Image (cartoon, helix red, strand yellow):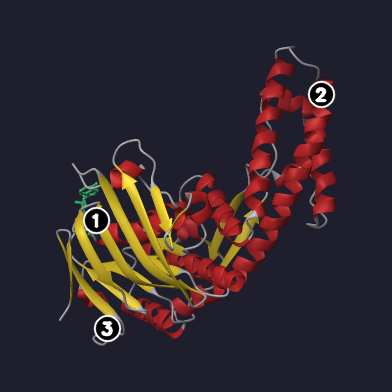
Amino acid sequence: MKISKIFLKDFRNFAELDLNLSETINIFLGRNAQGKTNILESINFASLGTARVSKDTELVRWNQDAALLRMNFSKADVSHDLAIEIPADRRRRRILFDGNAVKMRDFIGKLNAVMFSPEDLFMFRNSPITRRKFLNIVISQASPIYFSELTTYNRLLEQRNNLLKKIRENMASPNNLELWNEQLADAAAKILSRRIKAVENLNSLADEMQKEISAQSENLSLEYEIHDLQNVPAPQNFSVEYLQSWYHEIFKSRNFSDVKRGSTSFGVHLDDLNFFINGKELRLYGSQGQLRTTALALKLSEIQMLKNSAGEYPILLLDDVMSELDAERREKLLEFLLSQKIQTLITATEKAYFPEKIFGKIFLVENGAVKLEE
Ligand code: ATP
Ligand code: MG
């Protein structure tokens, strides 16, 4: 997957921007608040259909009616043309794909991009929610059915929780729980089974990447943590069939205490993901550079998984990844991107982060204007 051209009009701080990208590395240099991240955001938006941090309307340049975003890209050697108009008011977006009007949900998945941003680093220290979210996104990208399994689980969970509260207030009979226990167990089993497989897969890929970037000095391992495992019988295997009855038994055994607390005390909605560098837990002992390296290793594993399922790499967007990486790690990263021919857009405030000779293009970003470095 390669993007050849980007055209932006009234998008964020760009009144108008016309860019011809290199198929390899594209570096965007500039001081703070000049528009570097906004360029990456435009691709991320075209890929996901949502802005990462803001509402759609915030993407439109201040005091303008609409933002326009056009991209020419090739996928499996076929050229495509995408245009998205984002109105500043409540009107709907308009999307043209190869000249035909399409709905966003039909377009999602056509242009594939993966973005690393400094916020990703919080994942390691925040609550388990962000780590589960990471895992959910990675698995959904490779197996879209996982997303609907997750939706089913969350719906059943909410229904069981409502029932628990009603039973607590004597407004429903405990006999009704059985049906939800069974269904929730089915849904949980599918999700856990997929997550265990995905973590296994991620484990080997991410470890390879961590070694690559750290010049073999660090190994990375991921461990899926089943919440409260010390208080239940250990699972004998992770087949869906086995896990269904495993979950079912546990849910049943907790009927009484769950009613008392009014919520479900066991299940995939509470599990976590732990990271270890050379055997030591990252969240407790990791340095800034190690956190960054690991976040990067995970992104590179994510794009590798996408390549394995889709046949080609997505576009890689690296926002502010270079600071806090030492010269050797930066060099290893660029070497890897070049050797794999991954089209990458990378932002930085200093040219000094890059080697003298760089393949690709260097752009200078200043106050919403971009020019190619001479
Ligand atoms: P840094 O190095 O600090 O990360 P950056 O070059 O990545 O800086 P951006 O995040 O791209 O900077 O933002 C550049 C500017 O765009 C910011 O000053 C911001 O105020 C401005 N901006 C954001 N949204 C809009 C908008 N809708 N209209 C106009 N300007 C906007
Ligand atoms: Mg930025």
* Amino acid bearing label 3: Pro
* Amino acid bearing label 1: Lys
Q: Tell me the distance, in whole angstroms, between the alpha carbons under discs 3 and 1.
A: 33 Å
Q: How crowded is mark 2: few (under 14 residues within 10 Å), some or many (20 or more)?
A: few
* Amino acid bearing label 2: Asn
Q: Is residue 140 above or below residue 128?
A: below
Q: Image point 70% across, 57% down: which residue?
A: 194
Instruction: Give the mark, 3 or 2, whose residue is nearer the N terminus.
Output: 2
- Residue at which label 2 appears: 176
Q: In which quarter of the image is the C terminus?
A: bottom left
Confirm whether residue 322 shows in the render. Answer: no
Q: Image point 30% across, 48% down: which residue?
A: 59
Q: Would you say the beta carbon of the disc 1 residue lies within 8 angstroms of ligand 1?
A: no
- Residue at which label 1 appears: 9
Residue 373 as seen in the image, left or right of residue 320: left
Picture coordinates of residue 53, whole percent (x, y)? 37, 46
Instruction: Give the mark, 3 or 1, whose residue is nearer the N terminus.
Output: 1
Local SS, label 2: helix
Q: Which of 94 and 335 is in front in this view?
A: 94
Residue 140 as seen in the image, left or right of residue 260: left
Q: Image point 20% across, 53% down: which residue?
A: 13
Q: Which of 77 and 236 is in front in this view?
A: 77
- Residue at which label 3 appears: 355
Closer to viewer: mark 3 or mark 1: 1
Q: Image point 55% across, 54% down: which residue?
A: 137
Confirm whether residue 22 shows in the render. Answer: yes
